[in-house]
Image: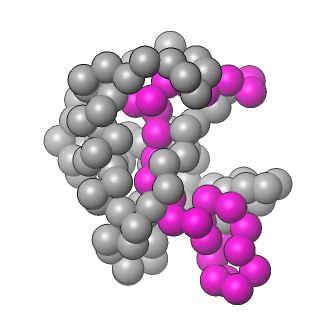
Amino acid sequence: MGPSEHQTADDKRWIAAIVDFGCIACCLDGYPGTPPCVHHIVDFGRRMGHRFSLPLCPGHHQHDSTSGKIALHPGRSKAFIAAYGTELQLLHRLETLLGFPHVSLP
């Protein structure tokens, strides 16, 4: 799925819900409601779909040397996973918290 793929109504509801929720990593750190960016989970270099997205603030998404946060990118996924779990584990957790059905892997 490329970035220009059409969003379904379910995709739009999911994206709106996660943006409203805030950064999942900040929430786990005790700082809920931190404004997020939308991170699309990829598999073998391709986006899995809009429904496979996580809310991550800039410090948890891309490395920001001033924030002191553990970032997912670039090349820091091992430390991020150790601290917060895998992207799919976080997705499952968010789905439960937000009352969305769990998506099946494509």
Q: What percent of the width, then of the height, locates residue 77?
A: 72, 54
Please tell me whether residue 77 is drawn above or below residue 87 in the rendered image. Answer: below
**Dominant secondary structure (helix, strand or loop) of the stretch shown in magenta:** loop
Say whether residue 69 is left or right of residue 8.
right
Residue 40, x across and y down, in percent = 55, 38
Q: Residue at x 75, y 80 (%)?
A: 65
Q: Position of residue 36 (x, y in %)?
A: 45, 61
Q: Is residue 74 magenta?
A: no
Picture quadrant where residue 68 is located: bottom right
Q: Is residue 63 magenta?
A: yes
Apparent side of residue 65 relative to residue 94 in the rendered image (left or right): right
Q: Which residues are magenta?
A: 44-70
Residue 95 sits above or below residue 58 on the image: above
Question: Residue sitting at 24 percent across and 35 percent down?
Answer: 13
What is the count of numbered marks? 0
The reply to whether residue 77 is in sight is: yes
Most extreme residue toward the front is 4
* Residue 78 visible to the viewer: no
Q: Nearer the viewer, residue 83 or 47?
A: 47
Q: In the rendered image of this protein, does residue 104 appear above or below residue 19?
A: above
Residue at 54% of width from left, 46% of height from top? 39
The part of the image, by quadrant, that contains residue 3 is: top right
Residue at 68% x, 61% y is: 62
Q: In which quarter of the view is residue 20 placed?
A: bottom left
Report the side of 103 relative to 13 (left or right).
Answer: right
Residue that lies at the very extreme toward the left in this rendered image: 99
Could you say where residue 99 lies in the image, as x and y percent from the top left?
17, 41
Quadrant in the picture for the N terminus? top right
* Depth order, front residue of 68/2: 2
